[in-house]
Amino acid sequence: MALLRPDIPTAVATYLLPGEQVVAAVHHHWARVAEPIGTAGAGLIVALWVDSNITAPTEFVATVVWLGFLLILARALWHLIEWRHDWFVATDKRLLLRYGLVTHKVAMMPLLKVTDMSYVRSVPGQLLGYGQFIMESAGQDQALRVVNWVPRPDETYRAICGQIFQSAPDAEAEPGPDTDDGPGGDSAPDQPPGFPDVPSTHSAVQDRLDSWSRALPVQGGEQVYASEDIRESRRGAKTGPIEQRPGRRWRRGNPSV
């Protein structure tokens, strides 16, 4: 009765389509066979009590009681084998109910047809841990409408609703390293943090232009791209540092001592 089980039961795999993923695969709750097994246990106690208190004139009563117990035991074994044979399966495409011991039957409802799914838990169901699912399908009669004795109903209900509404069952995946899935397949090395949509500074055309000219930093109004001879022509003559003699000052126009 495992939910989200990694292995698919052999009895269920026969009815699955290629690529169909199993969401839940469970037997009916054990409470379904509690009454037959309990009745068989009570019949055994009665048969033993009658057999231990029987007298010679009433031996036929013990025989009848033991025959009745064998019938009750056969009924309990039938229900137990049938319980182990039945499966309720939910996949990413449909709901399946496999039942029938002599004649195998499969009831199915596509998830796209499910317009509403009621979830009912009676008082015994709350105490023992089972529930009932009632599927509605836009007013149409479907082969699978009511599923009783569903074990672990809360978890099974959430798993089925997650498939119906296409919600994620687990937490959101953590973001991985920043990669570029474009035609080049390379990641942007200098991507500005917090702005994933901003492209990098250099494109393929810019990288081609960089191979023809040398990028220079902007200093004092210089152009970004300039050859070495142009930069030399813009420089002033190298006259060296200006020296000022002590005791000599300069005025506007002619120098004076």
Image (spheres, grey):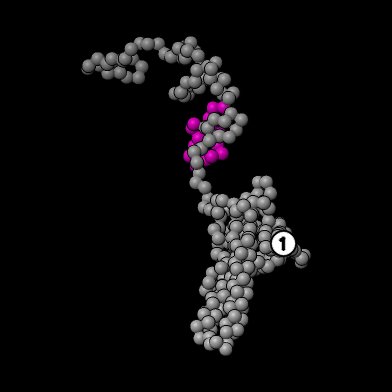
- The image position of residue 10, as x and y in percent, is 62, 52
Label count reads: 1
Locate the N terminus by quadrant.
Answer: bottom right
- The image position of residue 171, as x and y in percent, is 52, 52
Q: Of 246 and 37, which appears nearest the observer?
A: 37
The span shown in magenta is: 189-203
Q: Main secondary structure of the magenta part?
A: loop
Residue with the mark numbered 1: 103
Q: Is residue 147 above or below residue 225?
A: below
- The image position of residue 14, as x and y in percent, is 67, 51
Residue depicted at 35% across the width and 11% down the height: 239
Q: Residues within 10 Å of mark 1 (few under 14, many from 20)?
A: few
Q: Residue 55 colored magenta?
A: no
Pick out the residue farthest to the bottom.
Answer: 57
Q: Of 103 and 233, which appears nearest the observer?
A: 103
Residue depicted at 56% across the width and 39% down the height: 197
Residue depicted at 47% across the width and 14% down the height: 231
Pick out the residue farthest to the front.
Answer: 56
